[in-house]
Amino acid sequence: MLNLNYILENAGWAIIEINNGEKVIKINISYLHDSLQNLAESAIEIRNKSEKTVVFMDEPGEHWLILKKKENNELHYELRCYEDWASWNLISEDNYKIKIKGVTTIPNYINEVRNILVNIYEKYGVENYKLKWIEHEFPIEEYNKLK
C-alpha cells in the first residue's frame, strides 16, 4: 500500500505525506529542488525504468523516495532520510536512515501522483502555483501525460 498527499504551504514550501498503511511520514519540502516535477517524471518513467529516485529537499537535509520496479507491476519503495543534501554531494549517498518502506503496484503509484497533480492544478492553476512555489513552474507537460 502507498498513499501520497502533497500540500502546498507558504511561499516556497510544501509538505508530502507518505502512508504505507502502518505509519504516515510528513516531510517538509523546499523550493530548492523541483520535487513536484521530479515526482511527476517518476510516475511517467517508472513504467520503462527499473529504478527511480524522487528528491524532497528540506533546509537542511533531504529525503529520497527510492522506487524499484519488480515483476508483475510490483513496486518496492523506501524513503531515505539524509541529514544534509546528498543530491548536492554534501553527504555520502550511503549515509541515510530508512523512515518508511513498503510495496505497492505501479498503477497505484501512478494514480497517486496523478491525483496530486490534478488536485494542485484544480486548486491553484498554473499561475498561482508559480506564485506559491516561486522558483519552479507547474509540471504541465507531465500533468497532461498523466491525466
Image (spheres, helix red, strand yellow):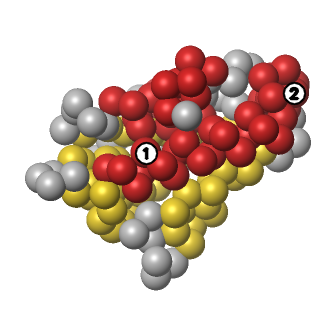
Between 144 and 58, the residue placed more toward the observer is 144
- Is 145 placed above or below 93 here? above
Between 12 and 104, the residue placed more toward the observer is 104
Position in image of residue 40 (x %, y %): 50, 33
SS for callout 2: helix
Report the disc number at residue 110: 1
SS for callout 1: helix
Q: Residues within 10 Å of mark 1 (few under 14, many from 20)?
A: many
Q: Amino acid type of disc 2?
A: Asn
Between 43 and 133, the residue placed more toward the observer is 43
Report the disc number at residue 27: none
Ranked by sequence position, the earlier of labels 1 and 2 is 1
Q: Who's the residue at 36% across and 50% down the image?
A: 107
Q: Who's the residue at 44% across and 71% down the image?
A: 20
Residue 96 visible in this rendered orientation of the protein: no
* Residue marked by disc 2: 128
* 80 left or right, relative to 15: left
Q: Who's the residue at 15% across and 55% down the image?
A: 72
| Residue positioned most to the front | 147
Residue 74 visible in this rendered orientation of the protein: yes
Between 92 and 113, the residue placed more toward the observer is 113
